[in-house]
Image (cartoon, rainbow, N blue to C red):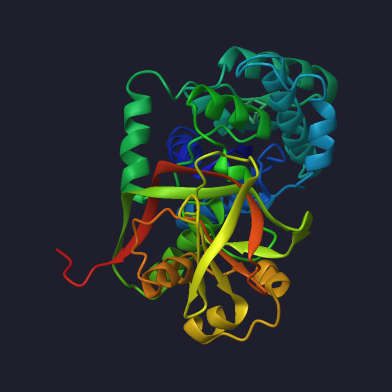
Protein backbone atom coordinates (compact mmCIF):
# COMPACT_ATOMS: atom_id res chain seq x y z
CA UNK A 1 0.00 0.00 0.00
CA UNK A 2 1.27 3.50 -0.87
CA UNK A 3 0.88 5.97 1.99
CA UNK A 4 0.90 9.63 1.13
CA UNK A 5 2.89 11.49 3.79
CA UNK A 6 2.30 15.13 4.72
CA UNK A 7 4.59 15.53 7.77
CA UNK A 8 6.33 13.45 10.43
CA UNK A 9 3.91 14.38 13.22
CA UNK A 10 1.04 12.86 11.26
CA UNK A 11 2.98 10.08 9.56
CA UNK A 12 4.90 8.49 12.44
CA UNK A 13 1.77 7.78 14.47
CA UNK A 14 -0.29 6.89 11.38
CA UNK A 15 2.27 4.43 9.99
CA UNK A 16 2.69 2.75 13.38
CA UNK A 17 -1.09 2.24 13.67
CA UNK A 18 -1.42 1.13 10.06
CA UNK A 19 1.30 -1.46 10.47
CA UNK A 20 -0.36 -2.75 13.64
CA UNK A 21 -3.78 -3.04 12.00
CA UNK A 22 -2.70 -4.21 8.55
CA UNK A 23 0.32 -6.46 9.26
CA UNK A 24 -0.08 -8.19 5.87
CA UNK A 25 0.45 -4.89 3.97
CA UNK A 26 3.85 -3.84 2.72
CA UNK A 27 3.89 -0.08 3.28
CA UNK A 28 5.63 2.41 0.96
CA UNK A 29 5.72 6.04 2.10
CA UNK A 30 5.31 8.73 -0.56
CA UNK A 31 6.20 12.34 0.28
CA UNK A 32 4.42 14.43 -2.32
CA UNK A 33 3.75 17.95 -1.02
CA UNK A 34 4.46 20.66 -3.60
CA UNK A 35 2.09 22.91 -1.65
CA UNK A 36 4.73 23.52 1.05
CA UNK A 37 6.28 26.96 0.98
CA UNK A 38 8.99 28.17 1.34
CA UNK A 39 11.29 25.49 -0.06
CA UNK A 40 13.40 25.47 3.13
CA UNK A 41 10.26 24.43 5.07
CA UNK A 42 9.70 21.66 2.50
CA UNK A 43 13.29 20.42 3.07
CA UNK A 44 12.80 20.54 6.82
CA UNK A 45 9.55 18.52 6.79
CA UNK A 46 11.08 16.01 4.39
CA UNK A 47 14.19 15.69 6.58
CA UNK A 48 12.07 14.76 9.57
CA UNK A 49 9.95 12.33 7.55
CA UNK A 50 13.15 10.64 6.31
CA UNK A 51 14.29 10.24 9.92
CA UNK A 52 10.90 8.86 10.96
CA UNK A 53 10.73 6.36 8.07
CA UNK A 54 14.30 5.24 8.80
CA UNK A 55 13.30 4.54 12.40
CA UNK A 56 10.22 2.61 11.29
CA UNK A 57 12.08 0.76 8.54
CA UNK A 58 9.58 1.88 5.87
CA UNK A 59 10.86 2.78 2.39
CA UNK A 60 10.24 6.40 1.38
CA UNK A 61 9.82 7.89 -2.10
CA UNK A 62 10.09 11.64 -2.58
CA UNK A 63 7.64 13.01 -5.16
CA UNK A 64 8.34 15.96 -7.42
CA UNK A 65 8.35 19.43 -5.86
CA UNK A 66 6.12 20.80 -8.58
CA UNK A 67 5.44 24.15 -6.93
CA UNK A 68 4.57 26.01 -10.16
CA UNK A 69 2.03 23.33 -11.10
CA UNK A 70 0.47 23.54 -7.64
CA UNK A 71 0.22 27.34 -7.87
CA UNK A 72 -1.49 27.06 -11.24
CA UNK A 73 -3.97 24.51 -9.84
CA UNK A 74 -5.09 26.80 -6.99
CA UNK A 75 -5.14 29.97 -9.07
CA UNK A 76 -8.14 32.14 -8.17
CA UNK A 77 -8.54 30.33 -4.82
CA UNK A 78 -5.81 32.21 -2.97
CA UNK A 79 -8.30 33.89 -0.59
CA UNK A 80 -10.24 30.75 0.27
CA UNK A 81 -10.22 29.84 4.00
CA UNK A 82 -8.71 26.59 5.28
CA UNK A 83 -11.03 23.61 4.60
CA UNK A 84 -12.41 25.59 1.62
CA UNK A 85 -12.11 25.08 -2.13
CA UNK A 86 -8.32 25.63 -2.28
CA UNK A 87 -7.78 22.80 0.18
CA UNK A 88 -10.07 20.54 -1.85
CA UNK A 89 -7.93 21.16 -4.95
CA UNK A 90 -4.74 20.70 -2.89
CA UNK A 91 -5.93 17.35 -1.47
CA UNK A 92 -7.13 16.20 -4.86
CA UNK A 93 -3.77 16.90 -6.46
CA UNK A 94 -1.78 15.11 -3.77
CA UNK A 95 -4.13 12.11 -3.58
CA UNK A 96 -4.29 11.77 -7.36
CA UNK A 97 -0.49 11.63 -7.65
CA UNK A 98 -0.40 9.07 -4.82
CA UNK A 99 -2.97 6.89 -6.59
CA UNK A 100 -0.88 7.14 -9.78
CA UNK A 101 2.23 6.16 -7.81
CA UNK A 102 0.37 3.12 -6.43
CA UNK A 103 -0.43 2.07 -10.01
CA UNK A 104 3.16 2.65 -11.13
CA UNK A 105 4.28 0.33 -8.33
CA UNK A 106 1.71 -2.30 -9.34
CA UNK A 107 -0.51 -1.63 -6.30
CA UNK A 108 -4.18 -0.68 -6.03
CA UNK A 109 -4.39 0.52 -2.44
CA UNK A 110 -3.32 3.90 -1.14
CA UNK A 111 -4.11 6.22 1.75
CA UNK A 112 -2.94 9.48 3.28
CA UNK A 113 -1.66 10.67 6.65
CA UNK A 114 -3.74 13.82 6.13
CA UNK A 115 -6.62 11.73 7.56
CA UNK A 116 -5.13 11.98 11.02
CA UNK A 117 -4.65 15.74 11.08
CA UNK A 118 -7.39 17.37 13.22
CA UNK A 119 -7.33 20.48 11.02
CA UNK A 120 -8.20 18.62 7.81
CA UNK A 121 -11.66 17.68 6.56
CA UNK A 122 -11.94 13.89 6.30
CA UNK A 123 -15.08 14.43 4.17
CA UNK A 124 -13.13 16.45 1.58
CA UNK A 125 -10.46 13.75 1.49
CA UNK A 126 -13.04 10.97 1.04
CA UNK A 127 -14.85 12.85 -1.75
CA UNK A 128 -11.61 13.41 -3.69
CA UNK A 129 -10.55 9.80 -3.26
CA UNK A 130 -13.91 8.47 -4.44
CA UNK A 131 -13.64 10.35 -7.73
CA UNK A 132 -9.97 9.34 -8.22
CA UNK A 133 -10.81 5.66 -7.62
CA UNK A 134 -13.61 5.83 -10.20
CA UNK A 135 -11.20 7.24 -12.77
CA UNK A 136 -8.08 5.20 -12.02
CA UNK A 137 -9.53 1.98 -10.64
CA UNK A 138 -7.55 2.36 -7.42
CA UNK A 139 -8.73 1.73 -3.86
CA UNK A 140 -8.48 4.42 -1.19
CA UNK A 141 -8.24 3.14 2.37
CA UNK A 142 -10.17 5.31 4.79
CA UNK A 143 -9.20 4.96 8.44
CA UNK A 144 -10.15 7.22 11.33
CA UNK A 145 -7.24 7.25 13.75
CA UNK A 146 -8.32 10.54 15.29
CA UNK A 147 -11.24 9.30 17.34
CA UNK A 148 -11.16 7.01 20.37
CA UNK A 149 -8.22 8.90 21.92
CA UNK A 150 -6.15 8.75 18.70
CA UNK A 151 -5.26 12.44 18.75
CA UNK A 152 -4.01 12.15 22.35
CA UNK A 153 -1.99 9.05 21.47
CA UNK A 154 -0.53 10.94 18.51
CA UNK A 155 0.58 13.72 20.89
CA UNK A 156 2.42 11.16 23.04
CA UNK A 157 4.18 9.67 19.97
CA UNK A 158 5.19 13.16 18.73
CA UNK A 159 6.78 13.95 22.09
CA UNK A 160 8.43 10.56 22.48
CA UNK A 161 9.99 10.68 19.00
CA UNK A 162 10.85 14.42 19.23
CA UNK A 163 9.28 15.06 15.83
CA UNK A 164 9.39 18.42 14.10
CA UNK A 165 6.08 20.13 14.85
CA UNK A 166 5.34 22.80 12.25
CA UNK A 167 2.97 25.62 13.09
CA UNK A 168 1.15 26.12 9.80
CA UNK A 169 -0.50 23.83 7.27
CA UNK A 170 1.98 24.39 4.46
CA UNK A 171 1.07 26.83 1.73
CA UNK A 172 1.81 30.49 1.23
CA UNK A 173 -1.88 31.47 1.32
CA UNK A 174 -2.84 29.56 4.46
CA UNK A 175 0.27 30.92 6.18
CA UNK A 176 -0.45 34.55 5.21
CA UNK A 177 -4.05 34.26 6.45
CA UNK A 178 -2.99 32.63 9.71
CA UNK A 179 -0.33 35.24 10.43
CA UNK A 180 -2.76 38.09 9.60
CA UNK A 181 -5.26 36.64 12.12
CA UNK A 182 -2.49 36.35 14.70
CA UNK A 183 -1.39 39.93 13.87
CA UNK A 184 2.13 38.59 13.31
CA UNK A 185 4.41 39.07 10.36
CA UNK A 186 4.89 35.97 8.20
CA UNK A 187 8.64 35.87 8.82
CA UNK A 188 8.78 32.37 7.31
CA UNK A 189 8.52 34.14 3.96
CA UNK A 190 11.57 36.32 4.52
CA UNK A 191 14.86 34.89 3.42
CA UNK A 192 17.78 37.22 2.79
CA UNK A 193 19.58 37.22 -0.56
CA UNK A 194 22.72 36.40 1.42
CA UNK A 195 23.28 32.96 2.94
CA UNK A 196 22.83 34.52 6.36
CA UNK A 197 20.60 32.61 8.76
CA UNK A 198 18.12 34.85 10.54
CA UNK A 199 17.15 34.08 14.14
CA UNK A 200 13.91 32.14 14.45
CA UNK A 201 13.83 31.50 10.69
CA UNK A 202 13.01 28.28 8.85
CA UNK A 203 16.68 28.12 7.76
CA UNK A 204 17.74 28.17 11.42
CA UNK A 205 15.31 25.33 12.25
CA UNK A 206 16.51 23.32 9.25
CA UNK A 207 20.10 23.59 10.38
CA UNK A 208 19.10 22.57 13.94
CA UNK A 209 17.24 19.46 12.78
CA UNK A 210 20.17 18.50 10.53
CA UNK A 211 22.51 18.79 13.51
CA UNK A 212 20.28 16.65 15.70
CA UNK A 213 20.51 13.82 13.16
CA UNK A 214 24.32 14.07 13.37
CA UNK A 215 24.09 13.92 17.18
CA UNK A 216 21.85 10.86 17.02
CA UNK A 217 24.22 9.13 14.60
CA UNK A 218 27.10 9.80 16.99
CA UNK A 219 25.05 8.70 20.02
CA UNK A 220 25.28 12.08 21.73
CA UNK A 221 22.34 12.79 24.07
CA UNK A 222 20.52 16.06 23.42
CA UNK A 223 17.33 18.01 24.06
CA UNK A 224 15.48 20.47 21.84
CA UNK A 225 14.56 23.42 24.05
CA UNK A 226 12.51 26.52 23.28
CA UNK A 227 13.29 30.07 24.29
CA UNK A 228 11.48 33.40 23.95
CA UNK A 229 13.37 36.33 22.55
CA UNK A 230 12.93 39.72 20.90
CA UNK A 231 13.16 39.14 17.17
CA UNK A 232 13.83 41.76 14.48
CA UNK A 233 13.17 41.97 10.77
CA UNK A 234 14.25 44.76 8.48
CA UNK A 235 11.51 45.12 5.88
CA UNK A 236 12.96 48.02 3.89
CA UNK A 237 15.68 50.55 4.39
CA UNK A 238 17.76 53.05 2.44
CA UNK A 239 20.07 56.05 2.78
CA UNK A 240 20.11 59.08 0.47
CA UNK A 241 22.92 61.60 0.18
CA UNK A 242 22.16 64.72 -1.85
CA UNK A 243 19.03 63.03 -3.16
CA UNK A 244 20.84 59.88 -4.42
CA UNK A 245 20.47 56.47 -2.80
CA UNK A 246 23.91 55.23 -1.66
CA UNK A 247 24.95 51.70 -0.60
CA UNK A 248 24.22 51.19 3.10
CA UNK A 249 24.16 48.35 5.60
CA UNK A 250 21.53 48.69 8.31
CA UNK A 251 22.60 46.71 11.35
CA UNK A 252 20.00 44.52 13.12
CA UNK A 253 17.71 46.12 15.74
CA UNK A 254 17.91 49.54 14.05
CA UNK A 255 14.55 51.26 14.48
CA UNK A 256 13.37 54.69 13.44
CA UNK A 257 10.40 56.32 15.20
CA UNK A 258 8.67 57.12 11.89
CA UNK A 259 8.63 53.78 10.09
CA UNK A 260 9.36 53.97 6.39
CA UNK A 261 9.43 57.80 6.10
CA UNK A 262 12.50 59.72 5.08
CA UNK A 263 14.21 61.39 8.06
CA UNK A 264 16.81 64.11 7.49
CA UNK A 265 19.78 63.92 9.84
CA UNK A 266 23.02 65.84 10.25
CA UNK A 267 26.29 64.54 11.68
CA UNK A 268 27.09 66.40 14.89
CA UNK A 269 30.52 64.93 15.56
CA UNK A 270 32.69 61.90 14.72
CA UNK A 271 34.56 59.92 17.33
CA UNK A 272 36.76 56.92 16.40
CA UNK A 273 34.94 56.35 13.11
CA UNK A 274 31.45 56.59 14.64
CA UNK A 275 29.35 59.54 13.56
CA UNK A 276 26.77 60.78 16.06
CA UNK A 277 23.75 62.42 14.38
CA UNK A 278 21.38 65.06 15.63
CA UNK A 279 18.11 63.06 15.43
CA UNK A 280 16.61 59.72 16.34
CA UNK A 281 19.88 58.56 18.02
CA UNK A 282 21.26 57.67 14.59
CA UNK A 283 24.84 56.33 14.53
CA UNK A 284 26.91 55.92 11.38
CA UNK A 285 30.00 53.81 10.97
CA UNK A 286 32.38 53.95 8.04
CA UNK A 287 33.53 50.75 6.38
CA UNK A 288 37.14 51.20 7.43
CA UNK A 289 36.10 51.38 11.08
CA UNK A 290 33.84 48.34 10.70
CA UNK A 291 36.74 46.33 9.23
CA UNK A 292 38.98 47.44 12.09
CA UNK A 293 36.42 46.53 14.76
CA UNK A 294 35.46 43.16 13.31
CA UNK A 295 38.89 42.32 11.85
CA UNK A 296 37.13 41.91 8.50
CA UNK A 297 38.21 42.87 4.97
CA UNK A 298 35.12 44.13 3.15
CA UNK A 299 36.09 46.24 0.15
CA UNK A 300 32.77 48.05 -0.12
CA UNK A 301 29.42 48.33 1.65
CA UNK A 302 27.85 46.67 -1.38
CA UNK A 303 30.00 43.59 -0.76
CA UNK A 304 29.05 43.70 2.92
CA UNK A 305 25.35 43.92 2.00
CA UNK A 306 25.58 40.89 -0.30
CA UNK A 307 27.56 38.78 2.19
CA UNK A 308 25.82 40.00 5.35
CA UNK A 309 27.03 39.84 8.94
CA UNK A 310 25.56 37.08 11.02
CA UNK A 311 23.22 37.79 13.91
CA UNK A 312 25.93 37.30 16.55
CA UNK A 313 28.32 39.66 14.74
CA UNK A 314 25.67 42.38 14.55
CA UNK A 315 24.91 42.11 18.27
CA UNK A 316 28.65 41.94 18.96
CA UNK A 317 29.20 45.12 16.96
CA UNK A 318 26.69 46.99 19.11
CA UNK A 319 28.49 45.67 22.20
CA UNK A 320 31.91 46.76 20.89
CA UNK A 321 30.52 50.21 20.20
CA UNK A 322 29.28 50.39 23.80
CA UNK A 323 25.65 50.41 22.67
CA UNK A 324 24.67 47.26 24.62
CA UNK A 325 22.35 44.49 23.54
CA UNK A 326 19.12 46.37 24.42
CA UNK A 327 19.99 49.24 22.09
CA UNK A 328 17.55 50.00 19.26
CA UNK A 329 19.33 53.08 17.84
CA UNK A 330 19.72 53.02 14.07
CA UNK A 331 23.27 51.89 13.30
CA UNK A 332 24.24 52.19 9.65
CA UNK A 333 27.47 51.33 7.87
CA UNK A 334 28.43 53.53 4.89
CA UNK A 335 31.49 53.65 2.63
CA UNK A 336 32.15 57.25 3.69
CA UNK A 337 30.41 59.37 6.26
CA UNK A 338 28.62 62.41 4.77
CA UNK A 339 27.68 65.52 6.74
CA UNK A 340 23.98 65.37 5.88
CA UNK A 341 21.81 62.48 4.80
CA UNK A 342 18.27 61.10 4.69
CA UNK A 343 17.37 57.74 6.19
CA UNK A 344 14.36 55.52 5.78
CA UNK A 345 13.91 52.34 7.83
CA UNK A 346 10.85 50.11 7.99
CA UNK A 347 11.55 47.38 10.53
CA UNK A 348 9.74 45.43 13.23
CA UNK A 349 10.66 43.91 16.56
CA UNK A 350 8.42 41.23 18.04
CA UNK A 351 8.27 38.54 20.68
CA UNK A 352 9.22 35.22 19.13
CA UNK A 353 10.12 31.69 20.15
CA UNK A 354 13.07 29.78 18.76
CA UNK A 355 14.38 26.27 19.28
CA UNK A 356 17.86 25.38 20.45
CA UNK A 357 19.84 22.19 20.72
CA UNK A 358 21.08 21.42 24.18
CA UNK A 359 23.73 18.74 24.48
CA UNK A 360 23.22 16.77 27.68
CA UNK A 361 26.29 16.30 29.84
CA UNK A 362 24.35 14.53 32.53
CA UNK A 363 21.78 12.15 31.21
CA UNK A 364 19.43 10.23 33.45
S1 LIG B 1 -4.10 25.40 3.73
FE1 LIG B 1 -3.08 23.40 3.65
S2 LIG B 1 -4.52 21.97 2.66
FE2 LIG B 1 -5.22 24.07 2.28
S3 LIG B 1 -4.33 24.61 0.32
FE3 LIG B 1 -2.89 25.35 1.84
S4 LIG B 1 -1.46 23.64 2.13
FE4 LIG B 1 -3.22 22.81 1.03
Return the residue nearer the eye: 158 or 257: 257
Depth order, front residue of 10/204: 204
Q: Is residue 262 above or below residue 112?
A: below
Left-right relation of 318 to 108: left
Q: Quadrant of the N terminus?
A: top right
Q: Is residue 236 above or below residue 153?
A: below
Q: Position of residue 219 (x, y in %)?
A: 34, 73
* Residue 123, placed above or below residue 10: above
Dividing the image into four equal quarters, which quarter contains ligand 1? top right
- Look at the image and tell me whether residue 27 can be seen: no
Residue at 47%, 59% (x, y): give it. Answer: 209
Q: Quadrant of the C terminus?
A: bottom left
Classify residue 180 by image quadrant: top right
Q: In this view, which residue lies farthest toward the front?
A: 268
Count of numbered marks? 0
Query: Is residue 89 visible to the viewer in this orientation of the structure?
Result: yes
Q: Residue at x 55, y 38 (%)?
A: 258
Q: Position of residue 151 (x, y in %)?
A: 37, 26
- 362 or 71: nearer the viewer: 71
In the image, 154: left or right of 43? left
Seen at 54% across and 51% down, the residue is 202
Where is residue 78? Give x, y as percent: 73, 23
Amino acid sequence: MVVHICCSVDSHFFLERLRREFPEEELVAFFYDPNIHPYSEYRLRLLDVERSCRKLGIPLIEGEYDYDGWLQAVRGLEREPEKGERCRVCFDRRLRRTAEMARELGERRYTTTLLVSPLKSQEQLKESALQIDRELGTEFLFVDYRSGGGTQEQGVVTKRERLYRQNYCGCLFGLSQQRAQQERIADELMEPVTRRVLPGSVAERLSLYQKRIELEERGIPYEIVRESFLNYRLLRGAVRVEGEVVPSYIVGYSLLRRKGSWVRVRVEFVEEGIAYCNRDEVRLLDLESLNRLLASRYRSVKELAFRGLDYGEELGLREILGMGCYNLSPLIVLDKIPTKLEISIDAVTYRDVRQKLLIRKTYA
